[in-house]
Image (spheres, helix red, strand yellow):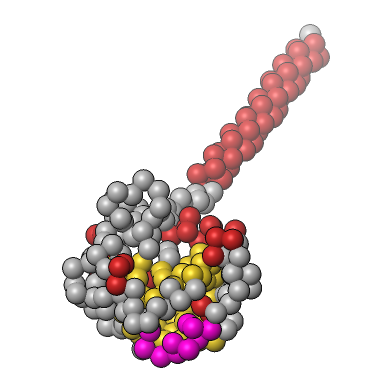
Amino acid sequence: MKSAYNLIKFAINTIVLLLFLVSCKDNSTRTKTIEKVAVSNIDSIIEPVQEKTDTFKLTEENAIEFFFEYKKNLNVNRLKITTNLGSFKIELFDDVPYHKANFIYLTRQGYFDGTQFHRIVKNFIIQGGSSDDQEMTAKRRKIGRYLLPPDTRKGHKHHRGTLSMPSSDTNNPHKLASPYEFFIVVTKPGSYHLDGGYTPFGKVIQGMNVVDRINAVEVGKGDWPQQNVYIEKVEVLQ
């Protein structure tokens, strides 16, 4: 009788032990699952977030305000333009502040480097700031799309050597200036029929012989030079 009792007791203890071990295994599995989920959640939380930064671009809405502030810190007005046919120096007029600020800003952005004098009219003008290179389009897209209002009442005339800004060709009854291009008057003593229609904003102060050399190259249809005249670099002189 005692032997049977001990056998039953042993069996009960064995069953209890087995249930305990199974329970521990389930808890262990559950714990590992919870820990795995927790690690996954933590990883997703601390993963660095890529911030989206908007690159500043000039527009019709912000250009004037931008150049109004930009011109306040400008204490320079002389630049050097280097081409594959030589270099010359220019001086920008202080009393045409938006056009001056625009030209210096574009220079410091490296916009003019690699563009061309793409339009040459004999004994009249050379016009630069454009190119048939796709890089020029990319530069303009990066800087922004905008026009500048004319500033023709400061008394500046289109004398020989004057820098002026052409008007945009498309839908532009008010002759707003195309900010990416400029032209230099070659005519002696000047092209005064342009006064009042375009904005003079500077003049050549050294190297007018290089401007004449550029004006002398052979041109084809549309006044585009048959020999590319590259603006290799424009730099601000301190």
Can you give x and y, in whole percent of width and height, for residue 42 in the image? 53, 44
Rendered view: 8 above or below 58: above
Is residue 207 part of the magenta span, yes or no?
yes
Q: Is residue 230 above or below residue 46?
A: below
Between 62 and 114, the residue placed more toward the observer is 114
217 inside magenta stretch: no
The image quadrant where one finds the N terminus is top right
Identify the image quadrant of residue 131: bottom right
Q: Nearer the viewer, residue 200 or 2?
A: 200
Residue 34, image x and y in percent? 58, 34
- Image position of 5 with respect to 133: above or below: above
Q: Quadrant of residue 135?
A: bottom right
Between 86 and 102, the one nearer to me in the picture: 86
Instruction: Identify the residue at image location x=41%, y=71%.
Output: 183
**Figure label count:** 0
Residue 12 shows in this picture: yes
- Residue 149 screen position, x and y as percent: 27, 59
Q: Which residue is drawn at 54% across and 43% down?
A: 44
Q: Which region shows up in magenta?
A: 202-213
Residue drawn at 30 percent across, 59 percent down: 148
In the image, residue 139 lies at what x, y percent? Answer: 50, 61
Residue 19 image-quadrant placement: top right
Furthest residue to the top?
1
Is there any visible trace of residue 135 in the rendered image? no
Q: Which residue is at a point 19% across and 72% down the rendered structure image?
A: 154
Which part of the image, by quadrant, shows the C terminus? bottom left
In the image: residue 112, left or right of residue 160: right
